[in-house]
Image: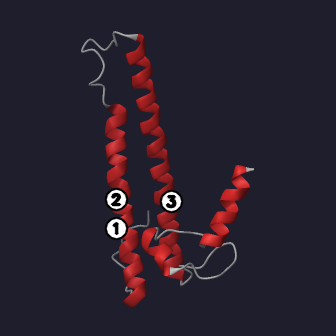
Amino acid sequence: MRKKTGAPKYEGKELEYYNALIAAAEKVRQQMNYHASEALDCSNADKRGVTTHMADVSSDNSRHEMEIRMLSEDGDVLHLIDDALERLAKGEYGCCQECGEMIPEGRLRVRPYAVFCIKCKTKHEEMMRR
Protein backbone atom coordinates (compact mmCIF):
# COMPACT_ATOMS: atom_id res chain seq x y z
CA MET A 1 0.00 0.00 0.00
CA ARG A 2 0.97 3.65 -0.25
CA LYS A 3 3.35 5.15 2.24
CA LYS A 4 1.50 6.86 5.04
CA THR A 5 2.26 10.53 4.65
CA GLY A 6 -1.10 11.69 5.91
CA ALA A 7 -4.40 11.66 4.08
CA PRO A 8 -4.37 13.63 0.84
CA LYS A 9 -6.56 16.72 0.81
CA TYR A 10 -9.63 15.45 -0.98
CA GLU A 11 -13.06 17.01 -0.96
CA GLY A 12 -16.55 15.94 -1.97
CA LYS A 13 -16.79 12.79 -4.07
CA GLU A 14 -13.02 12.30 -4.10
CA LEU A 15 -13.01 12.22 -0.30
CA GLU A 16 -15.86 9.67 -0.35
CA TYR A 17 -13.90 7.50 -2.79
CA TYR A 18 -10.73 7.84 -0.73
CA ASN A 19 -12.55 6.83 2.46
CA ALA A 20 -14.21 3.89 0.68
CA LEU A 21 -10.84 2.66 -0.58
CA ILE A 22 -9.24 2.98 2.85
CA ALA A 23 -12.19 1.13 4.44
CA ALA A 24 -11.95 -1.61 1.79
CA ALA A 25 -8.21 -1.97 2.43
CA GLU A 26 -8.79 -2.30 6.17
CA LYS A 27 -11.46 -4.96 5.61
CA VAL A 28 -9.13 -6.92 3.31
CA ARG A 29 -6.30 -6.68 5.86
CA GLN A 30 -8.62 -8.10 8.52
CA GLN A 31 -9.56 -10.95 6.17
CA MET A 32 -5.87 -11.59 5.47
CA ASN A 33 -5.13 -11.78 9.20
CA TYR A 34 -7.96 -14.27 9.62
CA HIS A 35 -6.86 -16.43 6.68
CA ALA A 36 -3.24 -16.36 7.84
CA SER A 37 -4.18 -17.48 11.34
CA GLU A 38 -6.47 -20.20 9.95
CA ALA A 39 -3.75 -21.43 7.59
CA LEU A 40 -1.33 -21.71 10.50
CA ASP A 41 -3.86 -23.22 12.94
CA CYS A 42 -2.94 -26.78 13.83
CA SER A 43 -5.67 -27.33 16.45
CA ASN A 44 -7.40 -29.99 14.33
CA ALA A 45 -4.30 -32.15 14.33
CA ASP A 46 -3.52 -34.61 17.08
CA LYS A 47 -1.65 -33.00 19.99
CA ARG A 48 1.44 -35.06 19.12
CA GLY A 49 1.53 -33.35 15.72
CA VAL A 50 0.30 -36.39 13.82
CA THR A 51 -3.18 -36.63 12.37
CA THR A 52 -4.73 -39.97 13.26
CA HIS A 53 -6.92 -40.65 10.23
CA MET A 54 -6.25 -40.35 6.49
CA ALA A 55 -9.48 -38.38 5.96
CA ASP A 56 -8.30 -35.87 8.58
CA VAL A 57 -5.02 -35.40 6.72
CA SER A 58 -6.87 -34.70 3.48
CA SER A 59 -9.31 -32.34 5.19
CA ASP A 60 -6.49 -30.45 6.92
CA ASN A 61 -4.56 -30.13 3.64
CA SER A 62 -7.63 -28.90 1.75
CA ARG A 63 -8.41 -26.33 4.43
CA HIS A 64 -4.81 -25.14 4.49
CA GLU A 65 -4.70 -24.81 0.68
CA MET A 66 -8.02 -22.93 0.66
CA GLU A 67 -6.81 -20.45 3.29
CA ILE A 68 -3.55 -19.87 1.39
CA ARG A 69 -5.49 -19.31 -1.86
CA MET A 70 -7.82 -16.84 -0.14
CA LEU A 71 -4.83 -15.05 1.39
CA SER A 72 -3.31 -14.70 -2.08
CA GLU A 73 -6.59 -13.38 -3.52
CA ASP A 74 -6.81 -10.83 -0.72
CA GLY A 75 -3.27 -9.70 -1.56
CA ASP A 76 -4.39 -9.18 -5.16
CA VAL A 77 -7.28 -7.02 -3.95
CA LEU A 78 -4.90 -4.92 -1.82
CA HIS A 79 -2.85 -4.34 -4.96
CA LEU A 80 -5.99 -3.24 -6.84
CA ILE A 81 -6.85 -0.85 -3.99
CA ASP A 82 -3.33 0.62 -4.08
CA ASP A 83 -3.66 1.14 -7.84
CA ALA A 84 -7.06 2.81 -7.32
CA LEU A 85 -5.55 5.18 -4.73
CA GLU A 86 -2.87 6.11 -7.25
CA ARG A 87 -5.49 6.76 -9.94
CA LEU A 88 -7.43 8.90 -7.46
CA ALA A 89 -4.31 10.95 -6.71
CA LYS A 90 -3.73 11.45 -10.46
CA GLY A 91 -7.35 12.41 -11.12
CA GLU A 92 -7.96 9.24 -13.17
CA TYR A 93 -10.15 7.39 -10.66
CA GLY A 94 -13.44 5.92 -11.87
CA CYS A 95 -12.46 5.72 -15.52
CA CYS A 96 -12.75 2.29 -17.18
CA GLN A 97 -9.28 1.18 -18.23
CA GLU A 98 -10.70 -0.63 -21.26
CA CYS A 99 -13.12 1.79 -22.94
CA GLY A 100 -12.33 5.04 -21.10
CA GLU A 101 -15.94 5.60 -20.03
CA MET A 102 -16.76 6.51 -16.44
CA ILE A 103 -17.53 3.55 -14.19
CA PRO A 104 -21.05 3.94 -12.75
CA GLU A 105 -21.10 5.25 -9.20
CA GLY A 106 -23.15 2.28 -8.02
CA ARG A 107 -20.38 -0.07 -9.12
CA LEU A 108 -17.77 2.06 -7.36
CA ARG A 109 -19.83 1.97 -4.16
CA VAL A 110 -19.85 -1.82 -4.22
CA ARG A 111 -16.28 -2.26 -5.51
CA PRO A 112 -14.37 1.00 -5.05
CA TYR A 113 -11.26 -0.50 -6.66
CA ALA A 114 -13.09 -1.48 -9.88
CA VAL A 115 -10.94 -1.20 -13.00
CA PHE A 116 -13.61 -1.83 -15.63
CA CYS A 117 -17.17 -0.71 -16.26
CA ILE A 118 -19.81 -3.46 -16.21
CA LYS A 119 -19.85 -3.79 -20.01
CA CYS A 120 -16.07 -4.28 -20.27
CA LYS A 121 -15.92 -6.52 -17.18
CA THR A 122 -18.61 -8.73 -18.71
CA LYS A 123 -16.62 -8.89 -21.96
CA HIS A 124 -13.49 -9.95 -20.05
CA GLU A 125 -15.36 -12.64 -18.13
CA GLU A 126 -16.86 -14.04 -21.35
CA MET A 127 -13.41 -14.21 -22.94
CA MET A 128 -12.06 -16.06 -19.87
CA ARG A 129 -14.81 -18.71 -20.17
CA ARG A 130 -13.82 -19.58 -23.73
Q: Position of residue 100 (x, y in %)?
A: 67, 80
Cα distance between the residues tagged 2 and 1 = 6 Å
Q: Is residue 81 left or right of residue 8?
A: right
In the rendered view, would you say 72 is above or below 20? above
Where residue 15 sits, quadrant-wise, is bottom left
| Camera-side mark, 3 or 1 | 1
Q: Which residue is mark 2?
A: 27
122 and 10: which one is in front? 122
Q: Closer to the N terminus: mark 3 or mark 1? A: 1
Under tag 3, what secondary structure?
A: helix
Spatial separation of the CA atoms under disc 3 and disc 1:
14 Å
- Vertically, is 84 above or below 104? above
Q: Residue at x 34, y 13 (%)?
A: 51
Q: Secondary structure at mark 1?
A: helix
Residue farthest left in this picture: 47
Disc 1 residue type (three-letter)? Ala
Instruction: Decide: is 23 above or below 57.
Output: below
Residue positioned 41% across, 15% down in the render: 55
Mark 2 residue crowding within 10 angstroms, few (<14) / some (14–19) / many (20+):
some
**Tag 2–tag 1 contact (CB < 8 Å):** yes
